[in-house]
Amino acid sequence: MTMIGLEIHCQLTNLQSKLFCTCKANYREFKINENICPVCIGLPGSLPRLNQEAVKKATMIAMALNCSTPEKIAFFRKNYFYPDSPKNFQITQLNIYGDTSVGGTGSIMVGDKKIRITRIQLEEDPGRLIYEGSSSKNQITLVDYNRAGTPLVEIVTEPDFENPKQVRDFLNILSDLLANLGVADPSLEGAMRADANVSIKGGKKVEIKNIGSFHDLEKAVHFEITRQESLHSRDIGIIQETRHWDDQRKITVSSRSKEEELDYRYFLEGDIPWIRIDSDIHQKLKSEMPESISSKKERYISKYNIPAQVADVLSSDKFYSDMFEKAHTESNAKEIANIITTDLMGLVDTREKRIASKLTFTHLKELADSIQSGKVSRSSSKNALHEILKTGKDLSAIITEFDLGNVSDESELSEIITHVISEESQAVEQAKSNPQTINYLVGKVMQKTKGKADPTLTLNLLKKHIGIS
Ligand SMILES: [Zn+2]
């Protein structure tokens, strides 16, 4: 049986400052080595000060993943020498004296499969190495410490995954959950990274490190399973080792590093005292947590009668559900959900497009109301939405500028209907004997008005002209 376990590193990108100093958590907007101070570059004598908000956010993640939350947490030094770690140790958490990490055991359902969480720990991100030159012949390596000390949450799972698809489904659920909690923006490059361990048929465990994106994680796991199965089929033993993901060649390669957990010589971080998180603080955090994705979904279905599939898509993406929450009323909720899931999603399917979008919830509300009142047709509304995203103009201005309004003038419509009736005598006779076939004539009127005829008025006028009720 294939067994896959994950270690996911997730930056708390929505925090103001780093984990132990006041440098900005958002290191991405700085020039190289501009977002640093004596604490995060590990100058002698500097002392860390723990960011309380980071502890709160990490605790919320633990709660959302149904993990236990200990009353006392501690930090440890993980000692290793590497250029991206200026202190020569990383401040992290470890459950060596009982559960002292921010989150203990928990679980989350992925479809019908229960994935157990081993622990959740809060730690600092190292700096970043920048290689100059080609990957095979690196001339120099530069170090950027802007990222050093950024708050990172590590989520460790039990080896409960059986195939790459379960891994992918879990990662999708997890990144939606983190975005919904408001603790991270998983779409930012490097905000979520992962290591995986893979073993087949009870064989030795292989760890894959250095996987930079969720997309690559699935590929890396898939590659590793295939590699191990191939060795197994040829009776070649699988050795326990650490392999690195080579994202250029899309393969895993054996790594020279041979560190074991023991080699890190963990010891308690003496510069940070044990932190006590009383149960009333846990209660308060729980009450401050945003509504979960599943409860949002249930509410959309039961309160607004939105189809389950639409409610699922709408609730799981924070960008869309925030839009929906602000724009909807009792009467237009279904229409708003419809616009978001059938029209908007195809138009803002990347982070860049979302940032560039000029759409506000007021636009969305006006759009839904205009469709419901018959001011614009569904097909014209899609064109209007396209224009709003680009320019942010008012809906009414766009309707006028592009002549998108519905034809709802009775005499104008009557004239068109008279034409249709004279051209379609056979269909008119048919409609007289079978009123259901009148939709064909409605379609003809729509064709002549390029989809802009008010559908209800068209139907009523047609019936009146033909003489059916
Ligand atoms: Zn700093």
Image: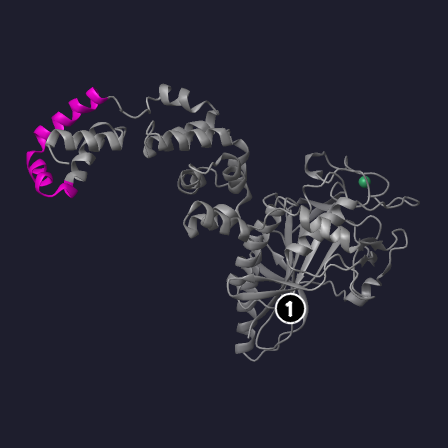
Q: How many marks?
A: 1
Magenta region, main secondary structure: helix
Residue, far right? 45
Q: Is residue 252 visible?
A: yes
Q: Is 431 rendered above or below residue 293?
A: above
Give neighbour class at mark 1: few <14, some 14-19, many 20+ (Cα, 10 Å).
many
Residue 273 horizontal side relative to residue 358, left or right? right
Residue 255 horizontal side relative to residue 363, left or right? right
Q: Amino acid at mark 1?
A: Val
Given residues 383 and 229, the one toward you in this image is 383
Colouring: one colour
Q: Residue at x 77, y 42 (%)?
A: 18
**Quadrant position of the C terminus in the picture:** top left
Q: Is 173 rendered above or below residue 30?
A: below
Residue behind label 1 places its C-beta within 8 angstroms of ligand 1: no
Local secondary structure at mark 1: strand
Residue 97, position as x, y percentages in the image? 83, 66
Residue 11, position as x, y percentages in the image? 68, 48
Residue 292, position as x, y percentages in the image? 58, 50
User: Quarter of the picture for ligand 1?
Assistant: top right
Residue 377 horizontal side relative to residue 163, left or right? left
Given residues 222 and 285, the one toward you in this image is 285
Q: Residue at x 20, y 31 (%)?
A: 460
Query: Label 1, on which residue?
Result: 206
Q: For the magenta stretch, what is the residue range? A: 410-437
Residue, far bottom? 235
Residue 63, position as x, y percentages in the image? 67, 55
